[in-house]
Every structure is written in C-alpha cells, then in structure tokens.
Image (spheres, coloured by chain):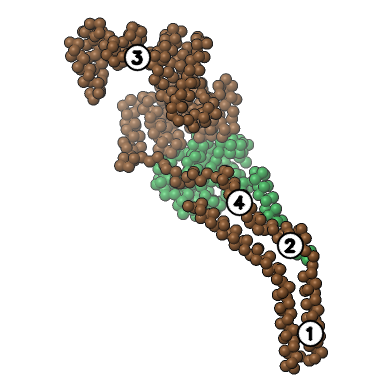
Chain colours: A brown, B green
C-alpha cells in the first residue's frame, strides 16, 4: 500500500516537472505573435494620444518609427535558423531525464528491493507466554543473601563461592566486582582449574585493562578444556573479542593454539554432532530443501562417512562419530555395528556403552528377549554402572525369559526403587514383578 | 554575461569544498566529537565538595596539592560507561597505587553509595556534586571524565570519555612513571 502511494507521489512529481517544461516549448513558438500584439497596442496608443493632442506630430512620428523598427527586429529574430542540435538536446533532455530517473529507480528496486522484509520494529519478537510472571524464584538480592548464608556454614565450598561470584557479577551488570573476584580466587584455591572461576577471573582482568593476563588465563583454560566442553563456545568468543579489542594475536601468547572451529558445535542431539561439517554451499543448499530432502542429504553424508570408515577401519573416533550419527538418525542396527567396530579397537567408555546398549535394545522385537549380543553389552553396562535403568530392565527380562524369576524380580525391584513416583512405566513394571514372584 | 555564467558554478564549488572537507575528516582520523580541553597545562580548578562517605571530611583543594599526582574522576551511578571503566579505576588504585579522587556528578548520594558498594570503591576520597555547580569550573561536558593532575596541581591529561586500557598503558602510566611532574 505504501509502495503504491510512493509510486503515485513519484508520478505526480514527474508530472508537475514535465508540464511546465512542455508548456514552455509551446509558448516559445508563439513568441513573435505576442510581440506583435504588444507593438500593435503601442502603435494604437501613439495614434490615440496624437489625436487627443497630448503628443505632438513630430514626437508621434518618431515614436512610430521606433516601434516599427522594433517590429522589424522581432521579425528578423524569428527568422533565425532552425534549432541547432544543441538546442534539440536542451529541448529533450529535461523531459527524458524526468522519465528516465524514476524508471531507473524502479528497475533498481525490482533488482535489489525486498518488499517482503519486515521493518525491524515489526519483526515478531519471541515473547514469554502471557500469564507467566516475569520474575520467577527469589530476587538477585535474596539469592546473594542465601549464598552468603550457605558460606557461613561451609566457608570454603568452591561451588557456593563460584555461585556467589556469579551472582555478584550479575548484580553489577556484568562487571566482575572486587567481592566477586575474591570469591572466585577463594574457589580456585580450593579447586584449582575450576573453569568457571578461571573464566570470570579472566573477564575481570580484561575489564581491568589487563587484556594480556586475561588472554593468557583463558588460552590456558581453553587448552585444558576437553573438546565439546559446554563453556568452550563462549570462552572462544570472549577470547576473540578481547584479542581483537586489545590488538593481541592469541598465537603470540600461545603459539601451539589450534584455530578454533569457525562454527560452534551444534548441540549433541543434532544428527550432525561430530560429523564432518558441511561446507557453506552445502549448508545453503540444505536450507532450501524440504525436510525429507534434507534428511536424505544428511543420510547421504553419513553414508559417505561409512564408506570412508570401511576404507580406514582403524579410526576409532571415526567409528564413534558414525555410530552416533546412525543412532540419532534412527538406524540402531547400523549404529550397533559401528559401536562394535569401535569397541573392538578399544573398549568403550561407560557413556558410549549406554548409547551402544540403547542401539542394541532398540532392535529387540516387542515381546522377544534381547539378543545375545545385546545381553553382553547390557552386562558390561551394568558392570560399569550398576544402577543403569536400561541394563536393569532388559537384563531382568532376559533372566525372566530364561526362567530365572528371582533374579528378574531382584533387578526390576532395584529399578522400581529408583523411579520417580509418577513414572509412567511404574505400573507396567509392578505388573511384571508380580509375574516374576 | 560571461561573469553571470560563472556564478552558476558557485553551488558546484561549494559542494566540492564540502565533499573535500568530509573526505578529509574521514581519512585523517580526526575525532569530530572531540572538543578538546582548555584546562590541560593549567592549574586545576577548585575542588570543593561534600564527602560522599558519611563521616569523612569534605573535599578541598589540599587533596590536589599533596605532592603526589592524583586522578580526579567524575562519575554517576546512572552512567553506563562509568560502569565499564570502574574495574579499570579499581585496578589503578589497588595495583598501581594511584590516588583517585571521585566526584559523583548530578547523582543522589545514596544512589552513588549503593553503586560503589556493588562495584567496589576505588577512591581515596569521594565527594558529590549534586547540582553540577563545581563541575562547571572543571569544564565538564558529561560523565565519565577523568583528569590527571600532577604533583604541582597542574592538569596534565583530560579524558572526556571512559578510560580504556590503551589510555592507561599509553598515557596515564608513562606520565606517572616519568614522575608526574
């Protein structure tokens, strides 16, 4: 609608400019006639005045001669040669420009204009659902008081000290105040290498104009952090920011620093976690696909990784990445296979074991007992983590299927004891225990 | 006739001069916001303000003539850039042992006190200038502003912006190391 008005306005302006220009051209052709009319009037007036006696005969004839002379000059001027090319240019340039400039603007707009993009104030903002009070839980001051109270009981608890430091920083609008610095320093003394305390102490140094000290501290922390640590993306962003601001190259402090990955790692639930990242072109292409196509493209990438792994089967991390991708994509059979390949190279860690066990039990047909392969993985999982719910449930089912009812009941009861009172599977489990007893 | 035509060039000439000036401003690194300071190189203006911390003596000129260079910092609890420079002042006071005199400018004393409570108080002496009368003598254009006054009571530096790390390392500390004279 607004665009329409603007176009109307432009058209109006062009019209207003054009009309006088064109009219001027028309008027110019009539100039001689106008002149002659004036001179005729003047001659008539001279004649009138002579007849009335207010103008003497010699004066009147002199005036007449003068006017006639002017008439001749005007007629001569009108006989001037036809307009020269330059004059033609002058005649056509203004109207042509008048039309050409809006036309050019329109063309440019059609080329680069984005009428569909909302103006910034009209972009819908994510809003908290109505009815939910904004402030939930205790206020900042109350939280600080509570943390201080806890510190009275346990004066050197590093966790409470760090929480207090963080709250004080929040209270000071992001500036790490001296009281918070003290809290973090005490926390660090109790728990050397505490990532949170190190991060905030570095932040304090950067705010206090000691960028180099801050960067040294942060780069140390970065080097010691395990890959995938939750604080790494933020830490790296801060390192970049302070390094850029102070004009210090992080490499001059830590020459062995690996360049941080450009994009922060996606959350682990994404199928892309641990996968080779797609190039920007691929990512752009993916953004345009329909969900099914995208899924297909991801599967294609995972298949490519699969092929690569079969060519170099000694890469344990690669197998784990593949297994994770398969598991998230909902292909438990292939995921379990990849976990087995990684496990053969070096036994899996408990966390991976749990993922593997999950991939195994997902292949179990409803009602059927777990496969021997699944049982062996579950047993290892139980050995590593005796309270693991998955292991307890399925190993119980295995015992039940083999007729060892007391063992089944023992495992299931142990599981039941850990479940929250409102767990949906409670009823089912209680039913099973009844059967086993 | 000829001279009349030349007259038409006048707007074009004006435009060219303006464009030249703007271009020069862009590339020469001139800060158009800088209004300079008339105080640098002159004796510091009068310091006279009631103390912000209860029970302390009012601030007087004697603080500027203690035989030691001092920083005078104008701040306010409502001023965000002041928040950003607070840790820097704290470090200058504690690590570098610089005497800093603070003036809360157009700021209610209780609000300024609460602010210092939260952020840490780096000031050896701190007063308040509620109506901004004293700041007029100091040529204050806003907060934060910081003056470095040498041992003889002469203004050596005047920052009309929050102090940054490079101001500290490139200007304040070298001047103080040289004796602040």
In the rendered structure, find residue B38 and report the number of the disc placed on it: none
What's the chain of the residue with tag 3?
Answer: A
Please give the name of the residue rendered at 67% of the width and 58% of the height, measured from the top-left corner: A94
Of labels 4 and 1, earlier in sequence is 1
Q: Are marks 3 and 2 on the same chain?
A: no
The residue tagged 2 is: B7
Q: Is residue A371 left or right of residue A210?
A: left
Helix, strand or loop under label 1: helix
Question: Comparing marks 3 and 2, which lies closer to the viewer?
Answer: 3
Q: Is residue A94 left or right of residue A81?
A: left
Q: Residues under labels 3 and 2: Cα distance?
A: 91 Å
Q: Residues under labels 1 and 2: Cα distance?
A: 38 Å
In the rendered structure, find residue A103 and report the number of the disc placed on it: 4
Question: Comparing marks 3 and 4, which lies closer to the viewer?
Answer: 4
User: Residue A120 at x, y = what percent?
Assistant: 47, 45
Q: Are marks 1 and 2 on the same chain?
A: no
Front residue of this view, candidates B57 and B126? B126
Which image quadrant is residue A379 in? top left
Q: Is residue A218 above or below residue A46?
A: above
Q: Are marks 3 and 1 on the same chain?
A: yes
User: Residue B132 at x, y = what percent?
Assistant: 49, 53
In the rendered structure, find residue A63 and report the number of the disc placed on it: 1
Residue found at the very far bottom of the displayed protein: A53
Task: Using a 10 Å C-alpha cutoff, classify the residue at mark 3 as few (fewer than 14 neighbours), some (14 to 19) or many (20 or more).
Answer: some
The residue tagged 3 is: A363
What's the chain of the residue with tag 2?
Answer: B
């Amino acid at each position: 609608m607004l665009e329409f008005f603007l176009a109307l306005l432009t058209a109006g302006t062009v019209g207003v400019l054009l009309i006088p220009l064109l009219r001027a051209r028309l008027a110019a052709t009539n100039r001689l006639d106008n002149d002659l009319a004036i001179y005729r009037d003047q001659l008539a007036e001279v004649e009138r005045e002579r007849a009335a006696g207010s103008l003497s005969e010699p004066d009147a004839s002199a005036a007449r001669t003068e006017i006639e002379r002017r008439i001749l000059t005007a007629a001569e001027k009108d006989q001037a040669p036809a307009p020269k090319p330059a004059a033609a240019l002058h005649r056509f340039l203004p109207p042509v420009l008048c039309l050409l400039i809006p036309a050019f603007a329109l063309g440019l707009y059609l080329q680069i204009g984005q009428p569909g993009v909302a103006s910034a104030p009209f972009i819908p903002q994510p809003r908290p659902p109505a009815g939910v009070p904004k402030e939930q839980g205790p206020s900042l001051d109350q939280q600080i008081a509570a943390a201080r109270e806890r510190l009275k009981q346990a004066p050197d608890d590093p966790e409470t000290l760090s929480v207090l430091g963080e709250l004080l920083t929040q209270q000071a609008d992001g500036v790490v105040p001296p009281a918070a610095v003290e809290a973090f320093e005490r926390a660090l003394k109790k728990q050397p290498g505490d990532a949170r305390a190190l991060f905030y102490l570095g932040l304090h140094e950067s705010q206090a104009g000691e960028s180099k000290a801050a960067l040294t501290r942060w780069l140390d922390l970065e080097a010691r952090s395990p890959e995938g640590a939750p604080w790494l993306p933020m830490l790296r962003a801060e390192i970049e920011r302070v390094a850029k601001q102070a004009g210090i190259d992080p490499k001059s402090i830590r020459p062995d620093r690996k360049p941080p990955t450009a994009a922060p790692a996606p959350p682990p639930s994404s199928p892309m976690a641990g996968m080779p990242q797609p190039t920007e072109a691929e990512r752009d292409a993916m953004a345009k696909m329909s969900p099914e196509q995208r899924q297909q493209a991801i599967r294609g990438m995972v298949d490519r990784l699969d092929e690569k792994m079969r060519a170099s089967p000694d890469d344990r991390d690669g197998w784990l990445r593949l297994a994770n991708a398969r598991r998230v994509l909902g292909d438990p059979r292939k995921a379990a296979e990849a976990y087995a390949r990684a496990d053969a190279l070096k036994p899996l860690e408990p966390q991976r074991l749990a993922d593997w066990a999950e991939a195994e039990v997902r292949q179990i047909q409803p009602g059927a007992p777990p496969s021997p392969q699944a049982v062996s993985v579950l047993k290892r999982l139980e050995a590593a983590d005796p309270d693991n719910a998955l292991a307890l449930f399925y190993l119980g089912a295995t015992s039940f299927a083999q007729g060892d009812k007391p063992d089944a009941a023992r495992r299931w009861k142990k599981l039941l004891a850990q479940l929250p009172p409102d767990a949906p599977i409670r009823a089912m489990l209680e039913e099973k225990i009844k059967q086993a007893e | 006739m000829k001279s009349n035509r030349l007259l038409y060039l006048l707007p074009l000439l004006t435009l060219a001069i303006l464009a030249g000036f703007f271009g020069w401003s862009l590339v020469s690194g001139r800060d158009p916001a800088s209004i300079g300071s008339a105080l640098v190189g002159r004796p510091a203006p009068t310091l006279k303000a009631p103390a912000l911390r209860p029970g302390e003596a009012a601030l007087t000129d004697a603080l500027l003539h203690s035989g030691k260079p001092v920083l005078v910092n104008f701040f306010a609890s409502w001023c965000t850039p002041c928040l950003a420079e607070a840790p820097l002042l704290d470090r200058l006071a504690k690590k570098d042992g610089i005497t800093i005199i603070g003036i809360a400018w157009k700021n209610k004393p209780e609000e300024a006190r609460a602010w210092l409570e939260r952020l840490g108080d780096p000031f050896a002496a701190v007063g308040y200038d509620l109506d901004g009368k004293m700041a007029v003598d100091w040529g204050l254009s806003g907060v934060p502003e910081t003056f470095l006054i040498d041992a003889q009571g002469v203004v050596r530096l005047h920052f009309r912006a929050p102090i940054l790390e490079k101001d500290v390392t490139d200007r304040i500390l070298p001047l103080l190391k040289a004796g602040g004279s």
